[in-house]
Image (spheres, grey):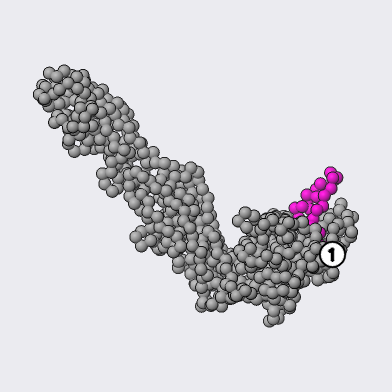
Amino acid sequence: MKHSIKRHLSRWLTLAAAATLGVGVGGFAGRGGAVRPVKAASDMWTTTKSVSGADFPEPIDPDTLLPAYVPFDQAMTVKRLDVDSDITGSSSQVLQNPIGNQVAVQVTNSTMQSGSIWSTSTLSLRQSWSTKMHIYFGKYSNPADGLAFVLAGVRPTAVGNRGSGIGVWKTENATLATALQNSFAVTFDTYHNDATNRGGELDVNAKTDSGQYVGWGFPGEKYQYKTDSSSPGKTGSLIFDNFTSTSASMAASVAASKASGGISKINDSKVTAIPYLAGLGGYQAVPSGESFADGNWHTVTASWTPGSTGGGTLTFSVEISSKTTISKSLTWTDTDLKQIFGSSALTNGVFWGFTGSTGDKMEEGLVTFETIPGLVDGGVSATVTNPDGTAASDVYQGTTLAQTYKLTYNGSISKQDWPVQSDGNTTSLTATLRTTDGYAFQVDKNKQVPVTVTRNGTSKTMLASVTPTHEVTDITDVYGNTKSYTDQLILSNLPPFLKSDGDGQFYTVTVPIVATAKTAVAATAGAGVVVGSNARYTTTVKTPAIVANPLQLIAPNFQFGPFSIAQMIKGLNAVSGTAGAITVAAPTNSHVTLTAQMGNTHLLDSTAAIPMSNTLSFTYNGAKRVLQSNASAVTLFSGNATPPSGAITNATLTTAPYPQIQPGTYQTDITWTIAVTPIVP
């Protein structure tokens, strides 16, 4: 007769208590998992109506669902600076919110108009700067004529040409003096003026199926326009840079022309003899089927990076749709900058702003400003570390990390406190906190998360709340606990930055994040935004990959016998047998307990219990272990480490006399349990 004791392992783990390791790890849906409701206009937005009487849609950051603009009262104006009056001939109207902040400018709103808005101070060409705006044209099937982002050496006191001029170009029959002098413009042209459309042939050389394009060039330069009969269009049509040459000696000139928008050709002796220098600037067509006048806001960015030995690079972009963004970088020398903006620009900087126009047709040309260079010199960055501040590499599901935001501000460079400390404005900062897919913020029953704000060596705890438009999801984690998570928080009443406190100001905001779902690789995503009444800054964050917990338990089998009926009737006394090996793996930073419990004996092909009394003895981890039938579980290991794997040795079996024994194979089940609880830092 053969008698064996075989291990029994419950599926994955036996849950002895709420804190033990469980099954069924759920994945957090993250930012793609829920439909976000359309946000109604906030109290900050304008109450002004469109020409049709409808509300203008509020420009909203799609990542945070917060307003994507700031008041520009002290930075931009439609007025002249030398006298207290509007820029001559301007159609621009400033749109205010209920408390009087200027939140948008409507450059045009009817036919035959020209409007503009300009900065109240200059941007230095010796320092880096960047800006982000949003433009809106309404929803029109046949709009005209467009808006332009402009840099100018001299601040205009009157508006530029309407219709095809978009406030910057000279029109077909006008003189060069009517163009905006000493300027560079990026035009968002919504109407193609060619031989088939009224308005002359200004755009005839910009080939486009959609009838719209993004053009860039130098309005005050004569070589920006057609001056002879060697190209399509009438004299005065725009000519964009198409300078080419098959001559090896001209290769450098051609490359410089493309990199600078052609402005370098004007002072290049190799090409000055070529008629009209084959144009200046450039353009890119809006794809067929897409339009600026689609009823949506379109994001515009511009940044300047000065060169180490003079000059610099201007980079600009405009989002046409979710599928199309047009961008360009142009690099200019100091000589180029003087040619474009005038000799004083290197010392005095350049003004910046927007122009726009309509002709016989119209559109509603609106502009909002999300970041305004020079108003506030601040920023925010985000990093993820272990809770103790050390670098975080691949982590297991359930791991808690620290996501830290660093807010910075320089008082001497800024024109204003951040935010403005005055009546009618919120005098504290508000942060929207986000993290990458696979991670989330664990919230309490009040849907809040404690965060740590540290400034000048002093820390305090504040409470961030779930953003009202975002959901809370319950997840059963790898330890069998059900907890609540969200993917976005809002933190209000953060301390302001004051100009009077000088440069180098900063403080940090640290929020715990939890790895909730396995991700194969590290990820980078938007980490949120910090908003004040006069500036807002966004940032991204990189999180480490999340890997499956190394949880494994392979229990050993024990084999004894065969024995005779006589031996079993008399009982066995410490009879030696064979045993397999045990294999255990568990997560790091966990407390692990390994137990074994011996149950009833039964025939191999039956589940009916047989009242045999057995004692199993073996050596594990250097110590003798004893299991008895139907007794309590025996703890084989308990500690802040993984139980050792390896061979089970010195296996012996003792049984009480059992006169009722019958021939057959007997089996006793042993339940092996590994229980894991996290070590909370």
Q: Secondary structure at mark 1?
A: loop
Left or right of residue 213, residue 524 in this image = left
Magenta highlight on residue 259: yes
Decide: is 378 above or below 597.
below
- At x 59%, y 70%, the residue is 56
What amino acid is labelled 1 in the image? Gly
Magenta segment? 237-262
What x and y, as percent, mark residue 325? 65, 55
Are there few (<14), some (14-19), or many (20+) residues within 10 Å of tag 1? many
- At x 28%, y 43%, the residue is 15
- At x 32%, y 44%, the residue is 21
Q: Which residue is mark 1?
A: 236
Magenta highlight on residue 106: no
State which quarter of the image contains the N terminus: top left
In front: 382, or 665?
665
What x and y, as percent, mark residue 452? 42, 59
